[in-house]
């Protein structure tokens, strides 16, 4: 299938059109690991000097350039870091200056030689911090900041320092470093983020927008985060992380470190004491490692390597008792809920200078994660947590070669292989790491308490492989057309991703227990057929761009073409062991392929004011397209996800919390009934039909961005700025249901009728609400309740079947809008201090027209409300389950301030403060609408208030670091102590959002605290450098 934003004939000719374009690019952030230096050598009258020898040292072999007729020189494709330039000309003396190179940035330098001065002129000033070509937004975090700012030492914490980016957790001293954060940036969800390591896009295309690896923090030379811009190498509107590892140089250099964080328990708040014995806290975190690099053959071959290990042992919020349906004895009494993670990384980089103009890089990385107790929480006691480990091939590889044909033209070729895979095995009370352990333990199936949502016995499992292969070619050319200077950038790439998954539940069943609802022998039961997913996707891209320099004006823009396609391969699955007659073994081959083709234009400008050029005005228009994940590719094959049949009011005759085929058959004669299904057609006895199909005219979702801002240089090392961003998000893709397969006779509100109202009261007044929308009630002894609510609930009219046949297509009449303002201040480390600060205001809303509404019931979705026009958009972190199931990301404002001050006697003080508005609590009532064979649609999560009417308290976190440096000849030792959450804030970060378990039945766990900000901890550290 094919879709595009321009006529198809033009798409087919695009590769030829690109060659003739002179559109431009701004500062590069994505899929690039180098920067560049350009400059000029002038005399006392500022006239360019030709024939000057300019030598660049640092980062590898010395490089020599001769200035052109106008005195200019250029060094392309440089590894980030600090360099030294030396310019010399017979009779004119020598001039030297240091230069700092950052990812994707051109550092401009002017050097002066004087004929009457024969001695060396040494310039100590750093490269100006103000980038007069930059049109994008984001932040570059250097090695100095990575080492001296107190953080939990992972890339997801660095995201909190970037304006416009919000994460789903507050990482206090490493208590969240064992699991990736979900995050959003400027109206783009986390599924549109990309992770780039040393120029390789390693983004996980199955857990879309996440990283397939964890990282050794001391291996980073620099981390760059982009949230927008004209760079045509960027595909999506999401947050772009670009991380570059260190490399070997002509000097033997290295470092070793050990950090220890010793946590402690803290008091549970008075509100939570009736139901929580403990809050979440650190037990201990130990982080140690070594990195070392140097020459194998000086000026020719260099090697660098690093090993790191991070042991993260946590305590998890724990209830006073866990209501288990098997009796009054609670096996978790006296046992502390824990989450233990081991992150182990190996990185090796080999750099070679093959010839004077040719260099190569070989990179090997391996990241191992072993986790015992993943997703532990008050509703997931230890036996239901996951034990996680690597699954499938190990190791990731990159081979890159760069040839510099001249100072005005270079090409880079790259090949990479990424092996992403892991397994999730439920603990099952035996600390299991494979399915054989679960069987040997005699565990039959998982059980969930219908009254409280607490799980017991076991949980689902998954075995996942996600390999990727990538080829890229990128280049840059510098030339002039009349009085215009051009910097042309171009490139092409091919990427292949695969996903193979086996997933289900132990014994292919889980049991919903009604004991605590007063029906000890009654249950709901899910019978599963395992999923065996096998999906393949391919990605092709072309881009071109140029930078036109016109005095104080720089015009920038670019054009990018993407083709994304994929499908699910032929699949087979086994029968359900208890009801093989209902769910037999099947094989399905669905040849349908989803294909997105798009063209994304970029255009921008910068203008420097005055002759000093200390103020830059910048603006631009950019279009981005979403990345296509393997989850979408597999939607047409029903075996890509596990399928189930659900039966209600079933009698458990032998009280073992497991339903056999015989028990089901007997129950169906005495009041039990079929309740619903997933990925199955209830009218197909063998359940082998293809239920979903792809719309051949579907467009990829796209975002149009408009940016306007300025930046002013207070000093060469201190800038302030402001940016305004407006984004329109269109062509969202989802599943629409048709009544007859292939007929496009869509379901609409006219197919629904009122069932009744979900009624009740809003939560106690201990919960904050938006002051513009009213208070929640008056404080009363022992608690309080807010005003009553009454929300209509609709079901399908009699005679209209439950939606079964889906079409993966663009959602009509639905868009989103983002508006944001950011204020920034950046002071580079100089004169013994540095600072980075920002404040962001964000407004992210959705527009829902009449054509977007199917079910008129107000339902909670992972992005907020299904039908609420103008409501806030949120990102559900855990989609209602797991350790972050109650986190819905959305803040109107946020800020961050970091800094370091170097004190006398080699002491230094670092600080990091973050704050944001509390996230929404989208409360719901879980409403039973009846069995879907008689017009009902099972349970619905009905919103009982606006998505952001209720919010958690605002969050503030302050971290401090005190360090002392010691020097012993060529060896340095730094001793440090870090204090995290200095104010010991215990802000509530999650609550149970389900107020009612039926239209009128109160949920016993409604509004309970499930997570609070971790308590204050201290980290002791020692770093040895040589």
Image (tube, helix red, strand yellow):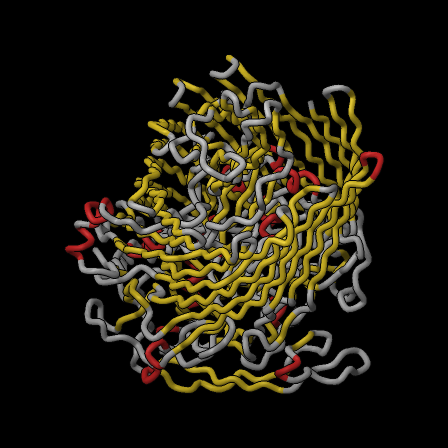
76 lies left or right of 368: left
Rendered image quadrant of residue 406: top left
In the picture as drawn, the residue positioned furthest to the right comes out as 905
Give percent across and percent down for residue 247.
Answer: 54, 27
440 lies left or right of 1024: left
The answer to whether residue 1010 of the structure is visible from this angle is yes
The answer to whether residue 671 of the structure is visible from this angle is no
Viewer-proximal residue among 428 and 943 = 943
Give percent across and percent down for residue 761.
Answer: 63, 83
Viewer-proximal residue among 46 and 271 = 46
Rendered image quadrant of residue 541: top left
The vertical placement of 626 against 99, above or below, is below
| Image quadrant in which the C terminus is located | top right
365 lies left or right of 855: right
In the picture as drawn, the residue positioned furthest to the top comes out as 297
* Residue under the image location 59 percent in, 47 percent down: 374
Give percent across and percent down for residue 75.
Answer: 44, 32
* Residue under the image location 55 percent in, 30 percent down: 114
167 lies left or right of 669: right
* Residue under the image location 29 percent in, 81 percent down: 799
Rendered image quadrant of residue 885: bottom right
The vertical placement of 168 against 353, above or below, is below
Give percent across and percent down for residue 757.
Answer: 51, 86
| Image quadrant in which the N terminus is located | bottom left
């Amino acid at each position: 299938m094919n879709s595009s934003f321009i006529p198809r004939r033009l798409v087919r000719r695009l590769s030829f059109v690109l060659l003739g374009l002179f559109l431009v690019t701004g500062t590069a952030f994505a899929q690039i690991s180098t920067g560049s230096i350009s400059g000029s050598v002038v005399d006392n009258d500022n006239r360019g000097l030709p024939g000057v020898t300019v030598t660049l040292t640092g980062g590898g072999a010395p490089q020599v350039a001769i200035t052109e007729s106008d005195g200019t020189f250029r060094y392309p494709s440089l590894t980030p870091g600090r360099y030294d330039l030396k310019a010399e000309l017979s009779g004119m003396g020598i001039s030297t200056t240091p230069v700092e190179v950052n990812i994707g940035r051109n550092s401009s330098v002017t050097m002066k030689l004087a004929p009457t001065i024969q001695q060396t002129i040494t310039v100590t000033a750093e490269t100006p911090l103000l980038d007069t070509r930059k049109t994008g937004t984001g932040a570059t975090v250097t090695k100095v900041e990575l080492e001296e700012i107190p953080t939990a030492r992972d890339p997801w914490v660095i995201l909190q320092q970037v304006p416009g980016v919000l994460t789903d957790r507050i990482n206090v001293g490493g208590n969240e470093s064992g699991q990736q954060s979900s995050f959003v940036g400027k109206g783009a969800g986390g599924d549109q983020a990309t992770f780039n390591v040393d120029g390789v896009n390693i983004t996980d295309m199955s857990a879309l927008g996440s990283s397939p690896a964890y990282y050794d923090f001391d291996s980073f030379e620099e981390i760059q985060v982009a949230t927008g811009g004209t760079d045509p190498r960027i595909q999506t509107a999401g947050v772009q992380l670009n991380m570059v590892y260190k490399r070997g140089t002509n000097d033997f250099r290295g470092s070793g470190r050990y950090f220890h964080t010793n946590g402690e328990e803290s008091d549970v708040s008075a509100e939570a004491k009736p139901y929580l014995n403990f809050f979440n806290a650190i037990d201990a975190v130990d982080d140690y490692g070594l990195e070392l690099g140097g020459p194998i053959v000086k000026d020719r071959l260099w090697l660098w390597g690093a090993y790191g290990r991070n042991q993260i042992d946590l305590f998890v919020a724990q209830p006073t008792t866990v209501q288990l349906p098997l009796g009054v004895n609670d096996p978790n009494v006296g046992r502390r809920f824990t989450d233990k993670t081991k992150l182990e990384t190996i990185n090796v980089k080999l750099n070679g200078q093959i010839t004077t103009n040719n260099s190569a890089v070989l990179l090997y990385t391996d990241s191992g994660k072993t986790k015992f107790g993943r997703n532990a929480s008050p509703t997931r006691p230890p036996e239901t947590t996951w034990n996680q480990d690597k699954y499938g091939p190990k190791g990731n590889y990159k081979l890159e070669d760069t040839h510099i044909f001249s100072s005005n033209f270079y090409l880079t070729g790259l090949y990479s292989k990424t092996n992403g895979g892991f397994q999730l095995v439920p603990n099952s009370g035996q600390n299991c790491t494979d399915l054989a352990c679960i069987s040997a333990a005699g565990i039959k199936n998982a059980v969930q308490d219908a009254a409280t949502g607490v799980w017991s016995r076991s949980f689902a499992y998954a075995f996942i492989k996600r390999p990727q292969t990538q080829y890229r070619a990128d280049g840059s050319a510098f030339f002039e057309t009349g009085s215009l200077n051009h910097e042309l950038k171009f490139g092409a790439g091919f990427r292949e991703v695969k996903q193979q998954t086996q997933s289900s539940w132990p014994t292919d069943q889980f049991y919903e227990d009604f004991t605590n609802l007063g029906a000890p022998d009654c249950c709901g039961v899910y019978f599963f057929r395992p999923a065996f997913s096998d999906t393949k996707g391919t990605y092709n891209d072309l881009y071109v761009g140029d930078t036109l320099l016109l005095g104080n004006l720089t015009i920038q823009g670019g054009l990018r073409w993407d083709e994304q396609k994929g499908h699910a391969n032929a699949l087979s699955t086994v029968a359900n062991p208890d009801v093989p007659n209902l769910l037999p073994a099947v094989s399905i081959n669905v040849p349908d392929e989803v294909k997105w083709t798009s063209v994304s234009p970029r255009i921008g400008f910068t203008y420097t004011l005055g002759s000093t050029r200390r103020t830059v005005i910048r603006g631009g228009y950019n279009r981005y397209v979403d990345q296509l994940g393997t989850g979408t590719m597999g939607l047409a094959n029903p075996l890509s996800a596990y399928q189930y049949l659900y039966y209600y009011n079933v009698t458990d005759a032998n009280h073992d919390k497991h339903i056999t085929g015989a028990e089901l058959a007997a129950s169906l004669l005495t009041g039990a009934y079929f309740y619903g299904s997933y990925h199955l057609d209830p009218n197909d006895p063998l359940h082998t039909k293809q239920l979903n199909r792809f719309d051949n005219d579907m467009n990829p979702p796209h975002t149009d961005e408009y940016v306007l801002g300025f930046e002013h240089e207070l000093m060469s090392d201190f800038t302030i700025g402001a940016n305004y961003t407006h984004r329109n998000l269109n062509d969202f893709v989802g599943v629409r249901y048709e009544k007859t397969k292939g007929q496009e006779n869509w379901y609409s509100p006219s197919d629904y009728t009122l069932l009744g109202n979900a009624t009740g009261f809003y939560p106690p007044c201990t919960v904050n609400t938006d002051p513009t929308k009213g208070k929640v009630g008056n404080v009363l002894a022992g608690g309080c309740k807010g005003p009553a609510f009454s929300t209509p609930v609709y079901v399908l009219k009699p005679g209209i079947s439950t939606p079964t046949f889906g079409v993966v297509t663009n959602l009509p009449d639905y868009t989103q809008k983002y508006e944001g303002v950011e204020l920034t201040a950046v002071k580079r480390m100089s004169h013994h201090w540095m600072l980075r600060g920002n404040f962001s205001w964000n407004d992210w809303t959705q527009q829902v027209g009449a054509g977007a509404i199917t079910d008129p019931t107000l339902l909670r979705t992972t992005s907020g409300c299904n039908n609420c026009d103008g409501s806030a958009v949120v990102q559900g972190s855990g989609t209602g389950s797991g350790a972050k199931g109650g986190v819905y990301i959305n803040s109107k404002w946020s800020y961050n301030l970091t800094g370091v001050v170097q004190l006398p006697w080699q002491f230094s003080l670092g600080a990091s403060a973050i704050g944001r508005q509390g996230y929404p609590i989208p409360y719901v009532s879980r409403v039973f609408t009846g069995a879907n064979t008689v017009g009902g649609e099972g349970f619905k999560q009905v919103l009982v208030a606006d998505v952001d009417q209720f919010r958690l308290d605002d969050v503030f976190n302050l971290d401090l670091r005190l360090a002392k440096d010691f020097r012993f000849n060529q060896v340095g030792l730094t001793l440090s102590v870090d204090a995290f959450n200095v104010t010991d804030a215990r802000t509530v970060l999650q609550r149970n959002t389900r107020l009612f378990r039926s239209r009128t039945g109160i949920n016993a766990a409604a509004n309970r605290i499930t997570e609070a900000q971790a308590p204050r901890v201290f980290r002791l550290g020692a770093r040895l450098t040589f």
